[in-house]
Amino acid sequence: MNLAAIRHFSTSRDCYCLNPGHFLFRIQAAKEDLAAVILHYQDKNIPLRIMDTRAQIAMQVAARDTRLDYWETELTIDVLCLRYWFELVDTQGNTVFYSNYVFSDKPFEDIDEMFD
């Protein structure tokens, strides 16, 4: 997996509201390097002990150029503040997790380590 090609900015460039409760997420990777990208998300303000708001949604390649694939998904959710991270699976079946500009070999559980 070409980690140097992974790009996501938790700003209006790659994560933004299309209309109330409807968001668009994007992430880029090296061309044909990833077999799957899964966006994991949860409500920041509701503790898991009160309600488990964790969920996930698969992303799709929305565009491709000579070097990069551009993955995206739209999400409809009613939250005040969303936390999220990515699960990246390469074409050999290796999995890496990405959040807050850090790669990990295990899923993110602490909301302070997730994109906000």
Image: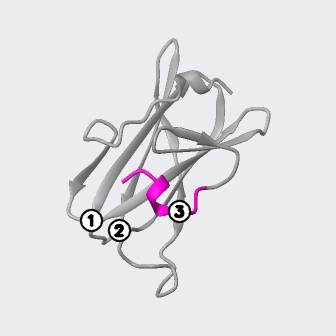
Q: Within the image, what quadrant is residue 116 found in?
A: bottom left
Callout 1 secondary element: loop
What type is the residue that disc 2 sits on?
Ile
What type is the residue that disc 3 sits on?
Asp
Q: Which residue is mark 1?
A: 21
Q: Was residue 90 drawn as part of the magenta stretch in this picture? A: no
What type is the residue that disc 1 sits on?
Gly
Q: Answer with left or right where residue 99 lies relative to residue 34.
A: left
Dominant SS type (magenta): loop
Q: Give the label, 1 or 3, closer to the camera.
A: 3
> In the image shown, does 29 or 97 lie closer to the viewer?
97
Q: Which residue is mark 2?
A: 77
Q: Residue furthest left?
A: 19
Q: Answer with left or right where residue 75 lies relative to residue 37.
A: left
User: Callout 2: 10 Å neighbours few (<14), some, many (20+)?
Assistant: few
**Magenta stretch bounds:** 108-116
Where is residue 75 shown, x and y percent of the image? 39, 58
Q: Answer with left or right where residue 96 lies relative to residue 7.
A: right
Query: What is the total number of numbered labels drawn onto the structure image?
Result: 3
Where is residue 16 shown, x and y percent of the image? 27, 48
| Cα gap from disc 2 to disc 1, whole angstroms | 5 Å
Q: Which residue is mark 3?
A: 110
